[in-house]
Image: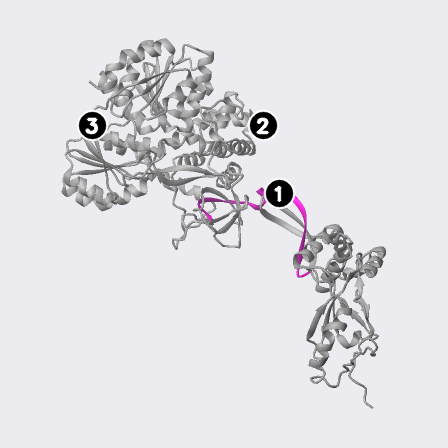
Amino acid sequence: MLPVARQLDAIRARVDGRGALVLVAPPGSGKTTQVPPALLDAGPLLLLQPRRVAARATATRIAEENGWRVGEEVGWQVRFERRSSKRTRLLVATEGLLVRKLVEDPLLESFVTVVLDELHERSVAADLGLALLREARRARPELRVVAMSATIDAEPVAAYLDAEVLEVDGRAHPVTIEHAVLSAEDAVRARLREATGHVLCFLPGAPEIRRLAERVRPSAESNGFVVHQLHGSLEPAEQDAAIAPSERPKLVLATNVAETSLTIDGVTEVIDSGLHKVLRHDAGRGLDRLETERVAQDSADQRAGRAGRTGPGRALRLWNERDRLRPQREPELLRVDLAPPLLDLAAWGADPRSFEWLEAPPSDRVDAALELLQSLGAIDGDRLTPLGDRLRRLGLAPRLGRLLIEAGGSALAASACAALSEGFVPRARRDDRGVAVTDCDLLALADELQAGPRHLRRAADSLAARARAVLGEVSDDDEQRLRHAVFLAYPDRLARRREPGSPRLLLASGGGAVLARESGVRDARFVTCVDLLAARRGAGAEASVRVASAVDDDWVEETEAELVHELHDGKVRAWHRRRHGALLLGERPAEVDPEQAAELLVEELTKRGLPEEAERTLRRLRHAALEVDVEELLRVACHGRTTLPEVDLLSLLPWDVRTDLDRLSPERLDVPSGRTARLDYPETGGVRLSIKLQELFGLAESPRVGPHREPVTLSLLAPNGRPVQLTRDLRSFWETTYPEVRKELRGRYPKHPWPEDPWSAEPTARTKRRK
């Protein structure tokens, strides 16, 4: 007997008494298949699973354990498919179905009990469904809610639901945990030689699974193993084959779709790469990025538990035992596009900014999602519009719903939406030379659909039928209408080629992108980037566009018109420019605005720095303690001009300032020799005069200038121009230092006067006069 089976009476009692329960039970304990049937006595029950393959497999397993038939007592419903009837009392469905049902019926009166399995995965649909169930219970207390998980932190969920917590101890079978830093290929080959049952290997994504399957298939078959792949993009039959009982040993290479709920009987070996792929929203580009990351500890525990479902097993983790994983996975609500759940909230009638989530998403992400819904015409303020209601009833992501509506619900548009919702990337149409060329990559779906995956064809047919139900009638296929519908569905994904024929694009958001080889849209000036993979992090990285659609120029409306002034080669020019976001639609010359021209010229002069003569004037002003607004003076110099002026700062000074400047910090000084010598005003302060000492004969005191009449620092020069003395006390120099200078230099420079008495000698800038 499985551990949960021994607790079914306690589970029923708690659900009957409190109406809400958080059940924590380890993997393999039987909670998924045994708890829901045990609660059916109270009335119809809805069991939610995070993935389609799990929903189908769970319904089948419950039917087998209870002697029921799928489609009768128990049924399942997933995106675009269902197998149930009016007699179905236990419906297994994916989490998105719960949200749709609650929007249509806020009290969920068709069910008495709702069981959310594997709640620890914290998908957006699960978090939204949980929140809406909480609101429904407030109005309908008899509605019962059970949240189940092996690894969730139960107390916050229990407090949120006002529920009891019941923990079931004991795993069905023991699992031995081992660590080894190996490649997945080496680990698989080793386990194939040792395994006594099926081998389950967790890898991050479908490409990794396909590559490993090709490499290990010969080795697996030589050891008697059948190789199966298990991921979300496979046909249901292929998924079912991977989990079906088998007498031959199986090697199942799976993504995290096999992490929870699914039971693959006979698995004794689990190999865990420790990696998975998650969507993360790139707020700068407004899109979700698929990134490979390390799993959380609760995910690793779930994976290991797959080895102990039907017997003892081993789990090999391909990382160092000392590595520490984060305890629990991050809620999807905190990392992906919020537009779809917020559209559901608007339909339900809640205020998205104040809605009570188990964990609320960041407010800036809520604002960005609401802005997108507004641009799609789905909401007006926080209220759902008639268009938004049609989008919701289509059951598609808001963008795809807008595409299907604008295309008139045509079969071609339904195919495109089905493909995009399933992550299917078509091959572009090619010309006779094999070169990909088309106006819209989605048109290739019309060619590929009949040969495409069956589940894609079923999804397209289902969407076409839903479009007829919502729109009343649908239009014929029209390629131009489809392109225009794509343009309206992705208003923030418009891009323009940087150069004619170039694959490099400029996005309306301001980022860069490159058309990938998968796209055949080669000629259009403007394109809509439908499948846009955000760039890898790093300088210069650009997003990649795998699916694009040409945009006619006349569809693109300006979002802003501006008068722009620019300075090139020292001259200001003006342009009238029309833009759509960051994209330039057109420009024409305009008359230059004098004030804006002056601002640009002042900014350029400031950036270049003032000429030396202007800097000297500034130093004189500082020495004189005179304050001026240099920027305003430059503005005066630039007024009425469109070219950079030569800046004569001195001539720009007001008359009174210039008068004070000449008085307090003169530019030149009269010296005894009859010349006027230029004064220097160093950055370090003070005043300096460099002059031949013979020019100062007869001058007893050092000259004084400035507001405080400070002495000038004299740099007394020899005839060769080199300083022989630096002094601020000329009298002291004549009395104490000059005799030594005279003694040293008169023999070296005999043509220059060196009188014994400098007080009475005639000052001169020349040599001795000839007799």
Mark 2 to mark 3 CA distance (whole Å): 56 Å
Quadrant of residue 307 within the rendered picture: top left
Residue 222 is a magenta residue: no
Quadrant of residue 756 within the rendered picture: bottom right
Label 1 vs 2, first from the N-terminus: 2
Residue 221 in picture, x, y percent from top left: 16, 42
Identify which residue, 3 or 431, lies in the foreground: 3
Q: In which quarter of the image is the N terminus?
A: top left
* Residues rendered magenta in the picture: 542-570
Residue 28 in picture, x, y percent from top left: 24, 25
Mark 1 to mark 3 CA distance (whole Å): 66 Å
478 above or below 574?
Answer: above
* Direction from residue 218 to residue 382 in the image, left or right: right
**Secondary structure beneath disc 3?**
loop
Mark 1 to mark 2 CA distance (whole Å): 22 Å
Residue 81 in picture, x, y percent from top left: 35, 26
Q: In which quarter of the image is the C terminus?
A: bottom right
- The residue pinned by badge 1 equals 558
Mark 1–mark 2 contact, CB under 8 Å?
no
- The residue pinned by badge 2 equals 380
Identify which residue, 130 or 552, lies in the foreground: 130
